[in-house]
Amino acid sequence: MSVLDLGIDLGTANIIISTGRGGAILNEPTVIAFDKNAEKVAAFGEEAYKMIGRAPEHIAVIKPLKDGVISNNDMAQELIRLCILKVIGKRLINPRIVMCVPSGITAVERKAVVESALSAGARTVYLIEEPVAALLGAGEDIMRPFGRMVVDIGGGTSDIAVTSLGGIVAANSVKKAGNSFNASIQRYIEEKYRVAIGERTAEDAKITTANIFWPSEEPTKTVSGRSLINGLPTKVTISEHDICEALTEDVDAIIAAIRTVFEKTPPELVGDIYDHGILLTGGGALLRGLDMYITREFGVKCHVADDPLGCVARGTHLAFKVRDKLRNGFEKVRI
């Protein structure tokens, strides 16, 4: 893989870029801030993320991806362009790019992703489905005639797939993931405690307090927000049980998606998965107790990958080396 070959995990929550030198060299929130008065980008990545909920009226803080796909094409193109320039600077030769997409993406959504990469300066674009990239990045040998299941929980979608002989045998995708977790926590606290909290506060509560398998009812986390009763600033102390209750619907939707994939998988491969276990990747894999919850639901050992956040990005980096062996879930695209 050339140093001008880029692997891009364009996630709803983060954009991660890796190169032929190995490893992720850019990891930024998928956020861009646009100054409407000056008509130019004010910030992107981590700097723009810090502006969420704190920017003045003339600065629009935009998340150009929603539920794993591009919702604002212009801002997505600009964000990708700025991130690529940050990585490679100005070069005479444009890079080849592998970009990740959810397994359930539509043709229209695929076209938007490819056009964004081409407009950002790519000379050739390859698309790889997130479950395939996640397995590659986790060090799994997906070329063998052996069934492997991955559950990749990102920011916008949760992608479940079973692979064998370098291809996807069965797959499913559900739009329940990190962002919907945050929204569910916000909604739960509003309904139970009559307190409105921000997205970043909800995310912090999810990271520090979530316990899906064995939640405690002891109040441990204090969050600040606005009272829906009198409109004044207030604080409320929540428990692991609160977060678990808030996420029940989302987690059950992921469980149902996994069950659907099992139902579509040939019996021989189901036996392989029973022996080898289910691999959990993505930011959602860090939800405490989720692996044990899945194990209890299906009777199949579920384990979290090493560095689950970086699996997909590493997989895009490795995809060039095995691109001739991948049967599906990977393609070269021209528009």
Image (cartoon, helix red, strand yellow):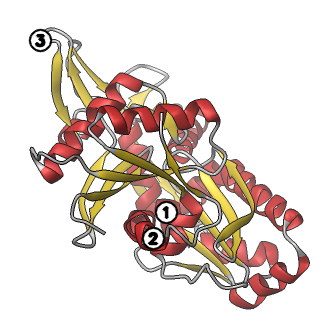
Percent across and percent down for residue 78 are 27, 30
Above or below 221: residue 116: above
Q: Amino acid at mark 3?
A: Ala
Residue positioned 84% across, 69% down in the render: 265
Name which residue type carries label 1.
Answer: Gly
Mark 1 sits on what residue?
Answer: 282
Q: Position of residue 306 (x, y in %)?
A: 44, 80
Residue at the bottom extreme? 275
- Residue at the (49%, 63%) spot, across then down: 282
Indicate the secondary structure of the residue bearing disc 1.
loop
| Disc 2 to disc 1, C-alpha distance | 5 Å
Spot occupied by residue 324 in the image (x, y as percentages of width and height): 53, 69
Residue type (three-letter) at the residue carrying disc 2 = Pro
* Sooner in the amino-acid sequence: mark 2 or mark 1: 1
Q: CA distance from mark 2 to mark 3?
A: 39 Å
Residue drawn 41% across the image and 25% down it: 73
Task: List x then y, in percent, for residue 34.
Answer: 22, 21
At mark 3, the secondary structure is loop
Sort mark 2 into few (<14), some (14-19) or many (20+) by Cα contacts within 10 Å: many
Marks 1/3: CA–CA distance: 37 Å
Q: Counting other residues with Cα less than 10 Å from the Cα at mark 3, is it few (<14), some (14-19), or many (20 or more)?
A: few
Per the image, the residue denoted by label 2 is: 308
Residue 258 shows in the view: yes
Marks 2/1 in contact by CB < 8 Å: the verdict is yes
Quarter location, residue 240: bottom right
Along the line of sight, the residue nearer the viewer: 95 or 168: 95
Image point 56% across, 33% down: which residue?
Answer: 109
Query: In the rendered structure, which disc, 2 or 3, sits on the residue that comes first in sequence?
Result: 3
Check whether the beta carbons of the residues at disc 1 and disc 3 lie within 8 A of each other: no
The residue that mark 3 highlights is 38
Q: Is residue 18 left or right of residue 115?
A: left
Q: Which mark is residue 217?
A: none
